[in-house]
Amino acid sequence: MEQKQRARQIIEILHLTYPDAETTLDAVSAWELLVGAILASQCTDERVNKITPHLFAAYPSLDEMADADVGDIERIIRSCGIYRNKAKAIKGSAKIISKEHGGQVPRTREQLLELPGVGRKIANLILGDAFGGQAVVVDTHCARISRLLGMTAEKDPVKIERDLEAVLPSDSYTDWGHFMVFHGRSLCKARCRDCVACPLQQLCAYGSQQNLEGKKAGDCV
Ligand code: SF4
């Protein structure tokens, strides 16, 4: 089957399987999402969502965050790991956004990438989830499952993003990242692929090659 056609079918199934797939970081603004995304590096979204209410209660505005004592930010975010770097990145980003972007999170990838602590993954997340654009967020779930599905053979996130953009419908880039996270947390876990229960099995490069005889839903393949 032609790759684009297969990708469209996979997307259709994923829409039905995960109709509510979206970012699991709590945020009411682009700034809050940016901070949440910085904190989420090597930390679960669940933990981040416990920390951010305290952080935004202490520093309700971006300008207050820009003026904050970095040690005070560190104390609040300590439990999410690599907190010194993250505190520096949050304060540094707030300062740049305040001074250079009129207090508004910038809307281009190039400008987002100039913020401390912001790499391509976070920039794409902001473009897609805060500004309604289309950008593939290539995290570990996305990289791993996209490879299993046969959508890419690459390991480098930028190359994976390029491969996905070549086959996915252009209005599905943002959804794809969400679908991969939801699928990676439910049926296609890193340590246990439930290919028998997976609705993508027939379309999946890995799943379609497995001998599932005698296997049942819930078994790891
Ligand atoms: S068929 Fe298996 S490997 Fe493929 S996406 Fe589904 S669970 Fe993952």
Image (cartoon, rainbow, N blue to C red):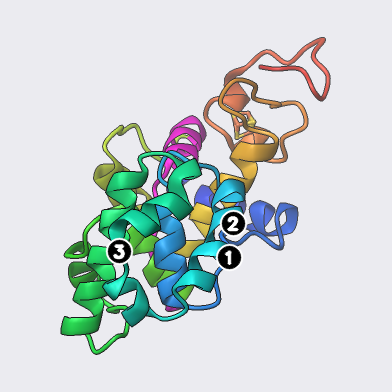
The part of the chain drawn in magenta is 131-149
Q: Residue at x 61, y 26 (%)?
A: 207
At label 1, the amino acid type is Pro
* Vertical placement of residue 191 versus 37, above or below: above
Tag 2: amino acid: Asn
Viewer-proximal residue among 6 and 49? 49
Residue behind mark 3 = 69
- 10 Å crowding of disc 1: few (<14), some (14-19), many (20+): some
Q: Earlier in the sequence, mark 3 or mark 2?
A: 2
Distance between mark 3 and mark 2 Cα atoms: 22 Å
Q: Is residue 89 above or below residue 40?
A: below
Asked where in the image residue 139 lies, by quadrant, the reply is top left
Q: Quadrant of ligand 1?
A: top right
Residue extending farthest to the bottom is: 102
Answer whether labels 3 and 1 touch (C-beta < 8 Å).
no
Q: Tell me the number on the disc at residue 53.
A: 1
Number of residues whose C-alpha sits closer than 10 Å to that of mark 2, classed few (under 14), some (14–19) or many (20 or more):
some
Residues under labels 3 and 1: Cα distance?
Answer: 18 Å
The one of 157 and 199 positioned closer to us in this rendering: 157
Split into 4 quadrants, where in the image is the C terminus? top right
**Mark 3 belongs to which amino acid?**
Asp
Q: Mark 2: is the Cβ under 8 angstroms from ligand 1?
A: no
Residue contact between numbered discs 2 and 1, judged by CB atoms under 8 Å: yes
Residue 104 percent across, percent down from the top left: 32, 84
Residue displayed at 43% across by 57% down:
37
Residue 127, visible in the rendered structure: yes
10 lies left or right of 126: right
Mark sitting on residue 49: 2
